Image: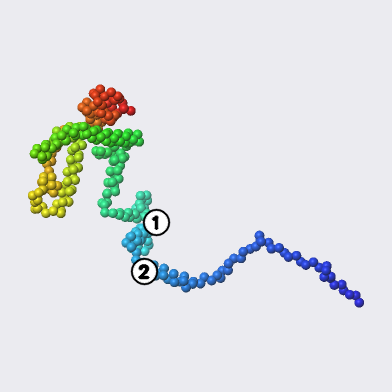
């Protein structure tokens, strides 16, 4: 009896473990049966948002915007077939897409006239008038007085700006020269207000009238007086609201009465000489003041120095350019 040979256990090799190929791994798609059940917290938040939306009262601005949107939407829609006007025109032979009137008219309209809504309270022709005035100023339109104005070029604009800056600078120098003159000649004005000691009491003399002041720096004094008068008027108005007008204090002097508004302050008349001087160009006014300072007080406005003699040795000259 032949015995079948069984395979030897020692000759068998265990199968090698297959290595996983991670580069070819496929990620499974999420199941389409994912549970989207709303939780109690989400449901409560949703109901809260819906309740707030229902309870919200739109403001006037929101209502106006919504009305404007509804109006624009209605105006952008062509004539619908359900419109009474469309039905009436259809009975007369009108067809959608055709024009009104005689056939073959190339200027006939296929759509109704557009509606332009005007906001504001201005008149109907206000915008046209504003545009016309703007064109006149810009020189784009002629036909009347003041039109056809030449447009200012960049060079002319810069030149005009330079002139204005120079005039402003000269005005400032004029005020500085007037203050220098006040410093020299103001002593003579104050000398007329000294106290005469008679019997141990001071007696104040009347100050010199403004018209007798040198016209070169009279404008500085007049401007100061006007500002002081305006300040007193405001003060009088304030005091008149807190004091009885019929009350009279026997101990009040003249200045107190003027402060309370009980006595009017003397106001000088107009000064034609000063007005004529102000009409001069700033450069001319400054030149007159500089020359007067040199001739009368031996003072150079540009050097800012008071020379001891009339020769004024060391001064470069009369003008600003000569002083560098």
Looking at the image, residue 212 sits to the left or right of residue 172; the answer is left
Which residue is at the far bottom? 1
Q: Is residue 242 above or below residue 304?
A: below
Q: Count of labels shown?
A: 2
Q: Is residue 243 above or below residue 17?
A: above
Question: Which residue is at 47% across, 70% downward?
Answer: 42
The secondary element bearing badge 1 is classed as: loop
Q: Can residue 86 be seen in this view?
A: no
Instruction: Locate residue 295, reporting x and y percent.
Output: 22, 26
Mark-to-mark CA distance, 1 and 2: 46 Å
Based on the displayed image, in which of its 4 quarters is residue 184 positioned? Answer: top left
Q: Residue 97 carries which label?
A: 1
Q: Name the residue under label 2.
A: 55
The secondary element bearing badge 2 is classed as: helix
Based on the displayed image, in which of its 4 quarters is residue 74 positioned? Answer: bottom left
The N terminus lies in quadrant: bottom right
């Amino acid at each position: 009896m032949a015995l079948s040979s069984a395979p030897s256990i020692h000759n068998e090799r265990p199968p090698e473990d297959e290595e996983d190929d991670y580069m070819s791994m496929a990620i499974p798609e999420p199941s389409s049966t994912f549970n989207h059940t709303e939780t109690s917290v989400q449901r409560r938040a949703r109901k809260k948002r819906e309740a707030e939306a229902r309870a919200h009262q739109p403001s006037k601005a929101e209502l106006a915007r919504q009305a404007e949107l509804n109006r624009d939407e209605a105006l952008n829609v062509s004539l619908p077939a359900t419109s009474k006007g469309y039905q009436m025109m259809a009975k007369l032979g009108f067809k959608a897409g055709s024009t009104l009137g005689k056939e073959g008219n190339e200027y006939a309209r296929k759509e109704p006239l557009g509606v332009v809504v005007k906001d504001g309270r201005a008149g109907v022709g206000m915008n046209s008038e504003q545009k016309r005035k703007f064109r006149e100023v810009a020189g784009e339109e002629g036909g009347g007085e003041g039109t056809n104005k030449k447009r200012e070029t960049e060079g002319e604009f810069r030149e005009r700006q330079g002139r204005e800056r120079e005039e402003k600078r000269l005005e400032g120098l004029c005020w500085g020269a007037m203050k220098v003159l006040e410093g020299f000649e103001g002593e003579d004005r104050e000398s007329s207000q000294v106290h005469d000691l008679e019997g141990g009491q001071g007696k104040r003399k009347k100050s010199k009238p403004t018209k007798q002041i040198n016209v070169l720096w009279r404008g500085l004094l007049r401007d100061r007086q006007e500002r002081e008068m305006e300040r007193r008027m405001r003060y009088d108005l304030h005091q008149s609201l807190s004091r009885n007008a019929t009350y009279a204090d026997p101990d009040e002097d003249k200045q107190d009465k003027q402060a309370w508004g009980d006595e009017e302050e003397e106001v000088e008349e107009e000064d034609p000489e000063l007005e004529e001087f102000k009409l001069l160009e700033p450069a001319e006014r400054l030149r007159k003041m500089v020359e007067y300072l040199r001739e009368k007080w031996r003072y150079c406005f540009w050097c800012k120095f008071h020379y001891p003699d009339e020769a004024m040795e060391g001064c470069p000259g009369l003008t600003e350019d000569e002083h560098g």
